Amino acid sequence: MSRLEDIAKRNRGAARWSLRSNFAFGLRSIFLLVILAGLIFTKWALPPKDTRPGINIVDPKARPPSPDGIYLMRRPSAPSTQPPVRP
């Protein structure tokens, strides 16, 4: 017998799809989807809050938000003649 005939004979009796393997694959897929959804829609993926003393002294909300995302420590002495650059 040739090699291809041996392979065909061996594969003739094997079931291509079995309920047990499909069920196990489905359970693994659902488990991974639940974990992925939990990472996306909850705070699971965020690092833990740093509770060391002295780390969070500066309040990040102390500065008012800038409309174009640029923070200046003080106002410029003269207004700019160039239009703002938007990315």
Image (tube, rainbow, N blue to C red):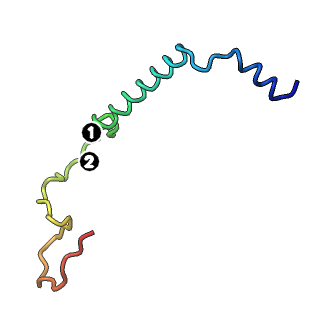
Image point 57% across, 19% down: which residue?
Answer: 17
Q: Looking at the picture, how far across and down is residue 1, in whole percent?
A: 88, 24
Question: Mark 1: which amino acid?
Answer: Thr
User: Where residue 52 sits in the image (x, y, percent)?
Assistant: 28, 41
Q: Is residue 14 left or right of residue 36?
A: right
Mark 1: secondary structure:
loop
Question: Where does residue 36 sit, x and y in percent of width and height?
Answer: 38, 33
Query: Is 81 placed above or below 22 here?
Result: below
The kind of residue on which mark 2 rests is Ile
Residue 77, image x, y percentages: 11, 83
Mark 2 residue crowding within 10 angstroms, few (<14) / some (14–19) / many (20+): few
Residue 83: image quadrant is bottom left
Check the image and name the residue furthest to the right: 1
Mark 1 — residue?
51
Residue at numbered disc 2: 55
Vertical position of residue 9 compared to residue 43: above or below: above
Q: Is residue 19 left or right of residue 31?
A: right
Residue visible at 55% across and 18% down in the picture: 21
Residue at position x 41%, y 24% from top? 30
**Nearer to us in this view, 15 or 67:** 15
- Left-right relation of 35 to 59: right
Question: Would you identify the image quadrant in which residue 4 lies?
Answer: top right
* Horizontal relation, residue 79 to residue 33: left or right: left
Please name whichever residue, 1 or 86, is drawn nearer the observer in this view of the structure: 1
Q: Are marks 2 and 1 in contact (CB under 8 Å)?
A: yes
